[in-house]
Image (spheres, helix red, strand yellow):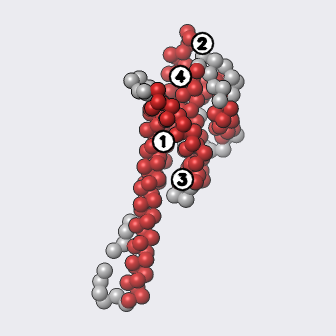
Amino acid sequence: MPENLPEWLQWLLKIFSLFSKQHKEKSQRVVEYIDQCLLHMHTIMEQDGKKSSEIEYAHTWLKQAYLDLFNTIGNLASPKECDIIRQSIVSARVLYHAIRYGKVEDESTQKDYEERLIRYTKQVYDQVEFRPNSNELFLRELAKDGKSIQESDRTRILNHIKEVCMEDIARIDSLKEVIKTRRVYVVS
């Protein structure tokens, strides 16, 4: 810091620098949290060779993230961005049940999917922010309509649901990049 600045201005810059560093650290933790969401979604999608405890943990973590997302990243992302991330997490949770049980009987997943479906049907977000995938029908049939996957259709249906998950992962990754650009840089 230049020595020729008035003392009060030097103190002000130090305080601003301290807040800036704290905000940058928090922003980094938020990006890491979103990366964890993406990692767990990938774990559920790509189960081959993974331990069942890993997959269970990923599902449990995503279920909790769905509940905690606003509290964790709420002040660094807009409420709309938080909600889009939350709704995107739901597809991996439905996929978990589809792979594991061939149906969705978990009430919290059904309720959370119902919330996602409302976003689509009421067109809460425009097509750019939260575009419905044509394969959303398969998630709806499992989570809302209570259908089971027949063994003869298992591979085909799971592939359709994975396509929805891949699009949701891309959406979350894109939002993560937007959030990263909001970082505050340290003034020294």
- Secondary structure of the residue carrying tag 4 is helix
- Secondary structure of the residue carrying tag 2 is loop
Residue 73 as seen in the image, left or right of residue 35 = right
- Asked whether residue 71 is in view, the answer is yes
Q: Earlier in the sequence, mark 2 or mark 3?
A: 3
Q: Position of residue 177 (x, y in %)?
A: 43, 49
Looking at the picture, which amino acid does disc 1 mark?
Cys
Residue denoted by label 3: 72
- Secondary structure of the residue carrying tag 1 is helix
Q: Quadrant of the N terminus?
A: bottom left
Q: Are marks 2 and 4 in contact (CB under 8 Å)?
A: no
Q: Earlier in the sequence, mark 2 or mark 4?
A: 4
* Residue furthest top in the image: 152
Q: Are marks 1 and 3 in contact (CB under 8 Å)?
A: no
- Give how far apart the Cα atoms at labels 4 and 1 are: 19 Å
Q: Earlier in the sequence, mark 2 or mark 1?
A: 1
Looking at the picture, which amino acid does disc 3 mark?
Thr
Q: Position of residue 21 (x, y in %)?
A: 40, 67
Q: Earlier in the sequence, mark 1 or mark 3?
A: 1
Residue denoted by label 4: 99
Q: Which of the 4 image quadrants contains residue 75?
A: bottom right
Residue denoted by label 2: 150
- Give how far apart the Cα atoms at labels 2 and 3 are: 39 Å
